Image (cartoon, helix red, strand yellow):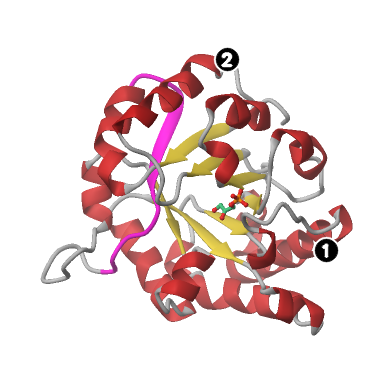
Amino acid sequence: MTAPIPLIAGNWKMNGLAAALGEARAVAAGLGSAAARVALCPPATLLERMSSALSGTAVLTGGQDCHAEASGAFTGDVSAEMLADAGAALVILGHSERRAGHGETDAIVAAKVRAALRGGLEPIICVGETLEERKAGWALAVVTGQVRGSLPAELAGKDFAVAYEPVWAIGSGLTPSLAEIEEMHTAIRAALLELFGDEGAARPILYGGSVKPANAAEILKVKDVGGALVGGASLKAADFLGIVGAL
Ligand code: 13P
């Protein structure tokens, strides 16, 4: 079974006005022959403009969330079809900031994953434990439980990525040890093999949480780390390119 193609995705979260499109252009211009697929996920307001600015380059764009329905009376929400219409190829789903701040359960995330597939988007499905869960020794059980609950059977035969993002490592400057990352990625890989058979070996498992140019090379070398989901360091082209170049 072929090894996963690495994916380095930048999650801009709720950051970026029109002036920030220059950073996206600079990522495309500085990319060279990257060893990974590279994507930027801006806020929905910038998605169409960023997709246009990056069209014809190797940098993909993605959304940060989508509604489970294709259209309807859901004020403020955006559907997978709308993201695709704005040029997105991917969508981040189940980010801990959505799970914690918007009450997204595994079942809701799974419904959004089905929506992404319906809309022709490749989902990046996020999982990760809180600090309390890690301290209690539950990290592996929590995360593999999220994988089983958030990844519907419809993903069989489809491109997708899982992103392991320990909640306590996001935006904190803290990261798990390399051994802890390896232990978790091995457990997620085992869950993917159990859910999807051999195909489960070909899907990248990204690490996310305080990835920066200085720690990217060692993290990206860990067994079964197939790329990164980058928050803060994806806002500046030089930092993001430093991470892509670390692969
Ligand atoms: P930071 O890289 O800012 O820690 O954020 C990680 C993240 O949440 C990416 O989705």
Q: Secondary structure at mark 1?
A: helix
- Magenta stretch containing residue 117, yes or no? no
**CA gap, disc 2 to disc 1?**
33 Å
**In the image shown, does 231 or 78 lie closer to the viewer?**
231
Residue that appears at 39% across and 38% down: 61
Q: Which residues are magenta?
A: 55-68
Q: Position of residue 62 (x, y in %)?
A: 39, 44
Is 227 or 47 nearer to us in this picture?
47
Residue 15 sits in which quadrant? top left
Q: Which residue is mark 2?
A: 32
Helix, strand or loop at mark 2 = loop
Q: Position of residue 88 (x, y in %)?
A: 33, 42
Q: Taking the image as drawn, is residue 105 in sight?
A: yes
Residue wearing tag 1: 183
Which residue appears farthest toward the left when viewing the image? 73
Q: Are marks 2 and 1 in contact (CB under 8 Å)?
A: no
Tell me: residue 224, above or below residue 135: above
Q: Please, what is the dominant secondary structure of the magenta stretch?
A: loop
Image point (43%, 80%), residue name: 107
Label 1 sits on what residue type? Answer: Glu
Would residue 152 be seen by someone viewing this image from the given angle?
no
Few, some or many C-alpha atoms within 10 Å of disc 2 (few <14, some 14-19, many ≥20)? few
Residue 17, quarter of picture: top left
Asked whether, in this view, residue 38 is left or right of residue 78, the answer is right
Which amino acid is tagged 2? Gly
In the image, is the residue at mark 2 within 8 Å of ligand 1 by its beta carbon? no
Q: Is residue 111 above or below residue 232?
A: below
